[in-house]
Amino acid sequence: MLQLNYIRENKDEVLKRLAIKNFKDAETIITAVLAKDAERRNIQKDSDNLKAEANQIAKQIGELMKAGKKDEAEQAKAKTGDMKAKEKQFDEQLKKLEDEMHALLVQVPNTPSFKVPNGKTPEDNEVVFEHGAKPTLHAKAVPHWDLTTKYDLIDFELGVKIAGAGFPVYKGKGARLQRALINYFLDKGIAQGYQEVQPPIVVNEESGYGTGQLPDKEGQMYHVGIDNLYLIPTAEVPVTNIYRDVILKESDFPVKNCGYTPCFRREAGSYGKDVRGLNRLHQFDKVEIVQIVHPEKSYDTLEEMREYVAGLLKELELPFRTLKLCGGDMSFGSALTYDMEVWSAAQQRWLEVSSVSNFETFQTNRLKCRFKDANGKTQLAHSLNGSALALPRIVAALLENNQTENGIKIPKVLVPYCGFDMIS
């Protein structure tokens, strides 16, 4: 959530930056917020003046009583009674205005960095890096959904029977490959200085609100109605919420966590060839990296995280490219996002496997995640997160790109984790 004082002091800049995200209601909402803020400050001033006057009269009552002026003291008491009623009225008005401002502010996305390209669709994203040669497959090569059937790695139909479409069952070497990737990603994160955490896979409303999933993405999350809990769409939500209502010290930075969780997304409205097999699931596995950092370091940290994910893809020997997302393709809470896509040789298309984002103070303002600077002043930290990595499309690309007429080769870096170097 944007900080009110920042909006108040930088209205034109806020509107200019929100235009990059193509947020159409920006001026209407920001103008309404500032109008309510001005009204709130006027009422607060009147309330403060009234309280100061009431305190002064209270002192006078004591003096009048000591002086034996009982009638004048009673008149003063009656006056303070009227003033208390007025104070209560002011408090109710202030609460109403604060609630109305909050309801407006949560509708406003994060202001994007000026580094974000203009654009409305994924076609407007900027390719900033590309690595690796696209493999040439043998004549009988097939997409991963055929390979998983041929080698009995994943049973999509059995998943439909048990839960529904988008909930696959991993089997045999398919399950072992999945587990190998999770352990590999976690080990790499730990070696990079991330502390591993294993968080809950359900969160309450406060946690969903803290990282910006609520009230923006209710329709994409599975809701456990009887308990009012949500299945997590990403480990970002519970891991970042570790730092809700926490005041850190500058010496704590950078705070680095990695965590593996299953992730759950309804993906309402998704259909067609682009969702076949592992391309788009309702349940999938992912290792997430999260950092809480000093505001002056967050963009350097974003580049470090981007390079870290790129290093994983290089070790997996997958051709990939890095995109800087345009304003129209960014998430609600992000200030700047890089997407990593791997090349799917059998499908002849790029598949997104990671997003790495800087949220600046958007999440930490909601979370009240703060730190004390060298002068003892409390200010908001910056939060960042990234997929390192999401498994389904990684698995899809590994299977497709490494298929031979005699089986599927396992990248060297994964062999110690899998216990085999070939699926045949």
Image (spheres, rainbow, N blue to C red):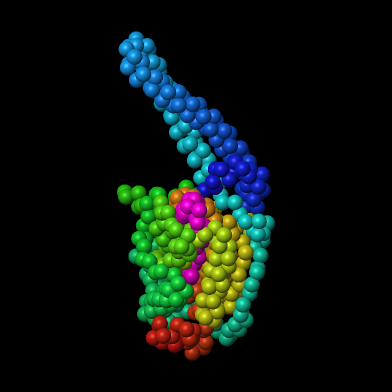
Give the image quarter of residue 12: top right
> Residue at the location (45% across, 51% down)?
367
Let me know if residue 142 is in the magenta part. no
Can see residue 27? Answer: yes
Residue 18, horizontal then vertical, whole percent: 62, 49
Which residue of the protein is positioned furthest toward the bottom in this rendering? Answer: 406
Let me know if residue 371 is in the magenta part. yes
> Residue at the location (43% across, 29% down)?
92
Observer-nearest residue: 272 or 300? 300
Viewed as shown, does residue 308 lie left or right of 285? right
Which residue of the protein is positioned furthest toward the top in this rendering? Answer: 71
211 shown above or below 356: above
Give the image quarter of residue 164: bottom left
- Looking at the rendering, in which quadrant would you find the C terminus? bottom left
Observer-nearest residue: 339 or 290? 290
Observer-nearest residue: 69 or 100? 69
> Residue at the location (64% across, 63% down)?
125
418 shown above or below 369: below
Residue 132, horizontal then vertical, whole percent: 61, 80
Residue 272, horizontal then vertical, whole percent: 54, 63
> Residue at the location (53% across, 72% down)?
309
227 shown above or below 257: above
Viewed as shown, does residue 218 lie left or right of 227? right
Residue 379, horizontal then vertical, whole percent: 50, 51
Q: Which residues are magenta?
A: 370-390
Is the stretch drawn in magenta largely helix, strand or loop? strand
